[in-house]
Amino acid sequence: MKKNKKMIIGFIAPAVIIFLIVFLYPIIRTIMMSMYKIESVTDTMEYWTFVGLQNYQKLFTTSIFKTAMFNIFKIWAIGGAIVLAVSLLFAVILTSGVRGKKAFRAIIYLPNIVSAVALATMWLQYVYSSKFGLLKSFLDSIGLHKLADTPWLDTDHKFWALLFAYCFGMIGYHMLIWMSGIERISPDLYEAATIDGANKPQQFRFMTLPLLKGVFKTNITMWSVSAAAFFVWSQLFSTVTADKATIVPVQYMYMHTFGAGNAVTERNAGYGAAIGIILCLCVVIIFTICNKLIKDDDLEF
């Protein structure tokens, strides 16, 4: 028995140590940092100045942070609705027995294997360009000249241009998650439903969707995490270092932690840590609400 305990401890110990060092310690340190004013993220604790909840109070009274949170909410809500709906549609089509499934799946997923920097640059220079952009050429070719002349990268349109480009790149990733869930559903259920007279829309509504509850929770959680960490696209779509039309919390956190941008007058890593804690809490709240509203109950047909 003692030998078994030693063996179990020997196998578990590396994972526990790695978890404590890589995950738990950074979380605890970040929570502590959010209570202090810190000149540099690498400063030792002797240089930290305790401020309590002042960092959080300052955040919720700062207009640029409110704008950043509203932008990320729009990305999460509007972008999430578009990405999850379109990716589910593609997943249903590709799992319905269509020819060339592997080729179409690879093509739709392709943007995910391209660097975000390269993908965003492609949209900025070759799609949204007001001189020779693909979007302008396409709209001109179908006679929509006024729409073709729209300055997609100006302040009024930049956010929606950013959101559309980002959604385009994320559809393939979430499509694969939907497909993995659909392919686990037994074909016998669909065969029985067909015999009973259920058509394809009815099978999708009353069988496929209820059986994808767990997959939906996974998808919305993954989307929430990626939305909370949204940074590269916002940084590249900004003309200098920050633009209110596209600024998001992680970009604002970067500016304060490393002192980048004209909107930041002081460098405060503790302030940046407070932003990270708020984003983390947002993801936890979304995950908790999903677990409460979407329950994996046993289904009977």
Image (tube, helix red, strand yellow):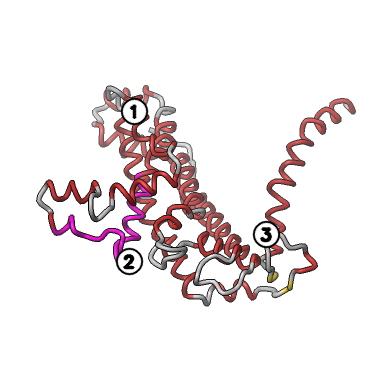
Q: Of helix, strand and loop, which mostly describes the magenta segment? A: helix
Disc 3: which residue:
30
N-terminal-most mark, 1 or 2: 1
Query: Which residue is label 1 attached to?
Result: 95
- Distance between the alpha carbons at the discs numbered 3 and 2: 34 Å
Q: Residues within 10 Å of mark 1 (few under 14, many from 20)?
A: some
Of 243 and 286, nearer the camera is: 243
Q: Is residue 7 above or below residue 213?
A: above
Residue 203 spot, x, y in % from top left: 30, 33
Whether residue 122 sits left or right of residue 252 in the image: it is left
Q: What element carries label 1?
A: loop
Looking at the picture, how far across and down is residue 99, in whole percent?
Answer: 27, 22
As drawn, which residue projects farthest toward the left? 143
What range is drawn magenta here?
146-168
Label 3 vs 1, first from the N-terminus: 3
Considering depth in this image, is 34 or 282 the residue closer to the camera? 34
Question: Can you tell which quarter of the image residue 187 is in?
Answer: top left
Of 251 and 129, the residue lying toward us = 129
Q: Quick check: marks 1 and 2 in contact, CB under 8 Å?
A: no
Q: Does the magenta stretch include residue 164?
A: yes
Q: Closer to the camera: disc 3 or disc 2?
A: 2
- The amino acid type, in three-letter code, at marker 3 is Thr
Q: Do the residues labelled 3 and 1 touch (CB within 8 Å)?
A: no
The label shown at residue 155 is 2
Look at label 2 and name its amino acid: Thr
